[in-house]
Every structure is written in C-alpha cells, then in structure tokens.
Amino acid sequence: MTKRPPAAPEAAAEPRWLTDAEQETWRAYQHASTLLEDYLDRQLQRDAGMPHVYYGLLVQLSEAPRRRMRMTELAQHAKITRSRLSHAVARLEKNGWVRREECPSDKRGQLAVLTDEGFAMLSASAPGHVDAVRAAIFDRLTPEQAAHFGEICRIIATGLEPAGGDVPWLR
C-alpha cells in the first residue's frame, strides 16, 4: 500500500504517502520492471534453456580473470543471496557450464569457473539476448532518455547499497 488508506482511529505518526504523480511513477516502474524481467527471462528460456539470472552469472564469469570468481564475489556482482547462488551454480554445473574449485588462498572458499561449454553457450545465446534488450529498452528511448535512465538507475542502486547495509549477498 503506497496511497493513503481511510483514516484509522488514533493513528500513529503519519507516513509520507506518495503524491498522485509519485504513485503514477511508482506503478509505471513496477509494471515496466515486471514486464521487462518476464520478457528477458522468457527469451533466454526459449533460446538458451536458462533463466535470466543464470545468464547473468555466466556473463559475470566470462568477464572475470581466467573466467573464475569467488562464490561470495559472484553473489555480490549478481546481487543475489549466497543460497540462491549456490542453487544456481548447482544447476549450471549439471549443464556442464560451470564447475566449482577450491580457492587456493582460502580453503574455506570456493571458486565458480566458467567451462568452455558454458562460454560456448553464452556466446551462442548473447546475440539473441542483446537483440531482446535493445528491442525492449534502447529502441524505445532516445539517446538522451537512455542516458537519464542509466543515471536514475545508478542513483537508486547507490541509495539501496549503503555500506554495511542489508544486501542480498550478505545474507
């Protein structure tokens, strides 16, 4: 609930309810983000047999030195819980796209490693995914709107990642 409900008897301090314009913006964001995530997820399921979050993990590993990354660092980059990452990596291991290795500098830690098969899958699925992202976002915006959109997203993300905050990868 983001709009003012009917008055309650002896209510506590009044929350800062959204204005009508803010409510409209909030609902537009919710609508667009839900549809976008579903659109990208369906495209990747159809074309690559994986959900969007798994594709993002493969991308992160492909960009890491030697295509490997500590699991805790991968969770942070992917903005997901360590539990969700562990489950996702187990599924990617079953497909032969990722393997786990012990961390040489810390025997308690593990590395996720992108396999050659995983890199091939990522390379094969990337063109369709880029087309989907372009069609869903960048083909609909002017370059100025795209720049503003990126700036707005960075501002929101920065505000939600305070130092020592309750972020998914620390849970």
Image (cartoon, rainbow, N blue to C red):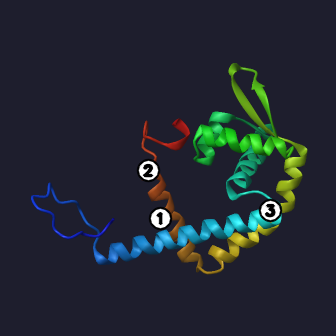
Would residue 120 be found to the left or right of residue 26 on screen?
right
Mark number, residue 160: 2
Counting residues from the start of the chain, the first of labels 3 and 2 encountered is 3
Counting residues from the start of the chain, the first of labels 1 and 3 encountered is 3
| Residue occupying the far left of the picture | 10
Counting residues from the start of the chain, the first of labels 2 and 1 encountered is 1
Residue 67 position, x and y percent, is 80, 41
Mark number, residue 152: 1
At 85% from the left and 46% from the top, the residue drawn is 95
Q: Quadrant of residue 21?
A: bottom left
Q: Quadrant of residue 140?
A: bottom right
SS under mark 2:
helix
> Quick one: label 2, few (<14), some, or many (20+) residues within 10 Å?
few
**Cα distance, mark 3 to mark 2?**
29 Å
Residue annotated with mark 3: 126
Would residue 163 be found to the left or right of residue 75 on screen?
left
**Cα distance, mark 1 to mark 3?**
26 Å
Residue 127 position, x and y percent, is 81, 67
At 45% from the left and 58% from the top, the residue drawn is 155
100 w.r.t. 10: above or below: above
